[in-house]
Image (cartoon, grey):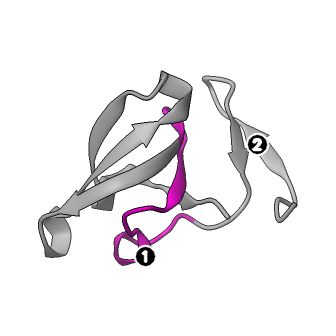
Amino acid sequence: TGTVSKIINKSFKEIPAGEIASQSDIKPGMKVFHAKFGEGEVIEINGGDDNRIARIQFKDLEGEEKHLVLRFAKLKILV
């Protein structure tokens, strides 16, 4: 639903179709997708401008949290 096509990347995770979100679109509480870490939920965001860092809890990593610099993270927002 909402996913027109799916692509399989090198680590064999299904990547939802759609645009990479801009860092200003990412907000705490959002469900996101990362090509390496899979599905996650944004817990908090710190920093400003080009140095925004998101703390994300990833379901595919058994709840492990990662801190990602949003300008490099290439996240997709899941609906």
Mark toward the viewer: 1 or 2 = 1
* 40 left or right, relative to 52: right
Q: Where residue 69 sits in the image (x, y, percent)?
A: 25, 52
* Near-viewer residue (61 or 19): 61
Mark 2 element type: strand
Q: Where residue 68 sits in the image (x, y, percent)?
A: 28, 46
Q: Which residue is drawn at 49% across and 62% down?
A: 30
Q: Residue at x 63, y 59 (%)?
A: 78
Q: Does the magenta stretch include residue 33?
A: yes
Q: Which residue is drawn at 44% across and 29% down?
A: 63
Q: Residues within 10 Å of mark 2 (few under 14, many from 20)?
A: few
C-alpha distance separating marks 1 and 2 = 23 Å
Which image quarter is the N terminus in? bottom right
Q: Where residue 62 sits in the image (x, y, percent)?
A: 49, 22
Please state which amino acid type lies under the numbered disc 1: Asp
Q: Residue 7 carries which label?
A: 2
Mark 1 or mark 2: name the one nearer the start of the chain.
2
Q: Which residue is drawn at 38% across and 27% down?
A: 64
Quadrant of the image occupied by residue 26: bottom left
* 74 left or right, relative to 35: left
| Residue named by callout 1 | 25
Q: Where residue 61 sits in the image (x, y, percent)?
A: 48, 24
Which image quarter is the C terminus in? bottom right
Please state which amino acid type lies under the numbered disc 2: Ile
Give the answer, above or below, for where 21 lies relative to 66: below
Point out the stretch of residues depicted in magenta: 20-39
